[in-house]
Image (spheres, rainbow, N blue to C red):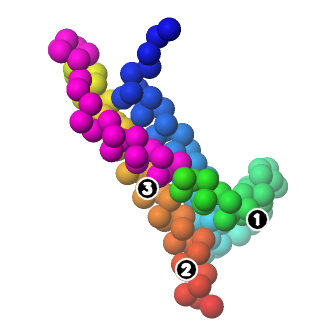
Amino acid sequence: MTRIDPHARNVGVTFGTLLASTTTLLCCVLPAVMVSVGAGAALVGLVSAFPQLVWLSEHKLLLFIVAGALLAGSGAMLWHARRLPCPIDPVAARSCTRLRRMSAVLFFVSLFAYVIGALFAFVLPAILR
């Protein structure tokens, strides 16, 4: 039985978190930005080509809960792995360091996307009412 390197696993989980956070941008930020810049017709064409965008917008609370849970899990995994030792082999040690850095960057990009999506989905509509 082969053991999966925790750093490589963290990159995979963090990439999944980035994907989930990106869906929050698709559901909430993209339509608002397109309408605000006068691209409403382009938005209609996009929705007709990808009708799943409507489903994402209708279920945005569920989408944000799942993305938030993935972010929390990914953050906990990164926090736990921050002090795990890297291998002694110089090539493997560089790879380990690179994977740690990549995981952290992906996590913070995901967190930024999640926060921007939450602002457009929940905060701005409450302010504009």
Point out the tag, 1 or 2, that comes first from the N-terminus.
1
For label 2, the SS is: helix
The rendered magenta stretch, by its main secondary structure, is classed as helix
The residue under the point 54% across, 40% down is 16
Name which residue type carries label 3.
Leu
Point out the tag, 2 or 3, that comes first from the N-terminus.
3
Q: Which residues are magenta?
A: 70-92
Name which residue type carries label 2.
Leu
Kindly identify which residue carries mark 2. Answer: 124
Rounded to the nearest angstrom, the CA distance separating label 1 from label 2 is 17 Å
Res 19 seen here:
yes
Give the label on residue 58, or none. 1
Q: Residues within 10 Å of mark 3 (few under 14, many from 20)?
A: many
Compared to residue 94, the image places residue 41 above or below, namely below
Give the label on residue 102, or none. none
Point out the tag, 1 or 3, that comes first from the N-terminus.
1
Name which residue type carries label 1.
Glu
